[in-house]
Image: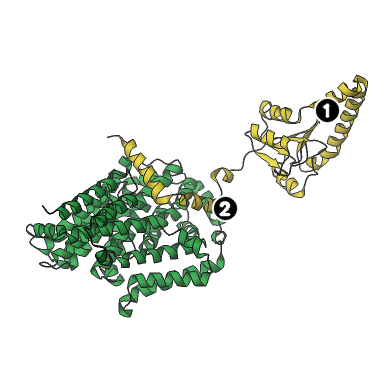
Amino acid sequence: MDVQLAVAVLVFLFTYALIISERVHRTVAALFGAAVVLFLKVVPWEAIPEYLDLDTIFLLIGMMIVVNTAKESGLFEYIAIKTAKLAKGSPMKVLLLFSVVTALVSSILDNVTTVLLLTPMLIYITRLMEVDPIPFLLSEVFASNIGGTATLIGDPPNIMIGSAAGLSFNDFLINMGPIAFLDLFITVLIIYLAYRGEMRVSPKRRERLLSIINGLKEEDAIKDPSLFKKSLVVILSVVALFFIHDRLGLEPAVVALSGASFLLLWSRQDPEHILEKVEWTAIFFFVGLFIIVGSLVETGVISDVASWMMGYVHSTGEAILIITWFSAISSAIVDNIPLTATMIPLIKAMGTSINTYPLWWALSLGACLGGNGTAIGASANVVVIGIAGKEGIRITFNDFLKIGLTIMFATVAVGTGILWLHYVGV
Amino acid sequence: MDMDIFNRIISRKFKNIAGDRYEQIAKRYREFLLLPEELVLPEVRSILFPIDRFSLDIPDELLETLSAYSGAFVKLVYVSEERTLRLIEQTLGEEEAEKLRMEKIRFARQTVKDFAPKLERLGLSVLKEPIIGSKSDDVIDMMSAQDFDLLVISRSFGAEPTKTSPTSPVVLKILQHIEKPVIIY
């Protein structure tokens, strides 16, 4: 066995083991693995630009700057209060509206920021309603992961897939949007059916809740009215540009970076303060990961695995099924970012003998929706469970697993069915 | 399977992913959302209102707030510090101390008599009582022993507010020992 190949496989497996065991921070594990393959020249220094996916990295940085600047204005708290008012004290409306708003915001911004900003309001309302907050929080988690599936910028795996396959914002919206919409509806319905007994509020309590919620002024949430308006304008412009980026011949990363730099210039926010809040640990995680996966590509491991897989996969339909369910089940257990990073070159290598276009959607579907399966399947799950824990609401791994697996299997099955009908036919 | 393992993993991951971001967001929300306990108006039927020569006059805002408890019973108590009298006794003798005690009681009676009408006009029933004792310990004892629903106290009670705190050290000590709602004016 080639020594470099052995090193690449060992480093990959060791890094994965470290990430899964969570004994060290995943960024440290990825950077350490990257350092080893670079030190041993498994990946030559000159090849780094080829493996570092700058589209993904700059798109993430650009969107993080936009979100962190907008966050300072109180925009998200404003959205939370508006949503609470629209729900008019009805538990069903709270469930539906918060799920829809979470999905919508998550389709544009990162899921962790979305749930971090909306969860406190959701806990507040459920406390006022004196209902069990768990179904509402779970619905929010699932909605954030489903919303992220819908767009190119909604979830890191989609950003990676879009960059690797050259897929546009509209490609994602057309292929994944309808699936996400249907899955969101199914999810809210399942949650409602599973917990409807715990969602009753007496008319007296509802009246009191309404008076409190209506007494809240969304304007109070706005910390900086000027920044609020500027953030809104820039976010809407960035989203509008995403719709036409391919027609303009612009990479999504360029749109995000342009929006970020324009907002920094216009808002006069302290760049040091904003850039400090960029999640550099996540960015460096991607850097390390891309280099480690690069070592697998460089040594021919990926092409060998792809050839081996092609011996068993005989049609696009089979490939859709295998990729969707493999990535969904794996994402429920391990981080979907390294999984996507590993699957991307594999699908690319399969391109020699199969049409890969539907397979990218299969990967996106599995990687994004698989996260709903377990409490540690996606970052948003961990954040909401963590916030709930801090607020004295205990969501156990088992509580999550029961409903999470149901949602995961239902939503992935629906998505697979739609992809199958679209790309394979009856 | 031990679910605590997963809960520990989640706690660790939350720290990595959310860091102190949640605390900052929660703090922002607290600025405009009322806490659940703030949403419930406590029922107030009895109020302890200690005053002394440091106490400030009742501001209009406080009178407005107290008017919400119309019909409640107020124990208006003027507290003179006993330790001062002991010091006088030790330095100037018993006779001088007794003269001072009588003067203090007279002043206390007059003060509560002047003070009470402001509360009575709000529909509160006021019991006036001048006492000589410990400004902090007696207030703490009365709050726990007689189970008052509310304590209303001047921020200058017992002494002038210090430079480092908006209330006097006596008020600070009292606040540390009672669990009932307090209005500081």
How are the colours assigned in the image?
by chain
Chain letter, yellow in picture = B
Kind of residue at disc 2? Glu
What residue does disc 2 label?
A: B31
Please state the chain letter of the residue tagged with numbered disc 1 in the rendered image.
Answer: B
The foreground one among B79 and A197 is B79
Residue shown at 18% from the left, 61% from the top = A298
In the rendering, at what x and y percent does residue A14 appear?
24, 47
Which quarter of the picture shows residue B105?
Answer: top right
What residue does disc 1 label?
A: B84
In the rendering, at what x and y percent does residue B26 appear?
50, 50
Q: In the rendered view, does A316 fall on the left or right side of B10?
A: left
Residue shown at 80% from the left, 26% from the top = B83
Q: Please tell me whether residue A416 is drawn above or below residue B125 in the rendered image.
A: below
Q: Colour of chain A?
A: green
Kindly state the secondary structure of the residue where label 1 is placed: helix
Q: In the rendered view, does A156 fall on the left or right side of B112?
A: left
Q: Identify the mark at residue B157; answer none if there is no mark.
A: none
In the rendering, at what x and y percent does residue A163 appear?
28, 67
Kindly state the secondary structure of the residue where label 2 is placed: loop
* Residue A368 seen by the camera: no
The foreground one among A405 and B93 is B93
Please state the chain letter of the residue tagged with numbered disc 2 in the rendered image.
Answer: B
Kind of residue at disc 1? Thr
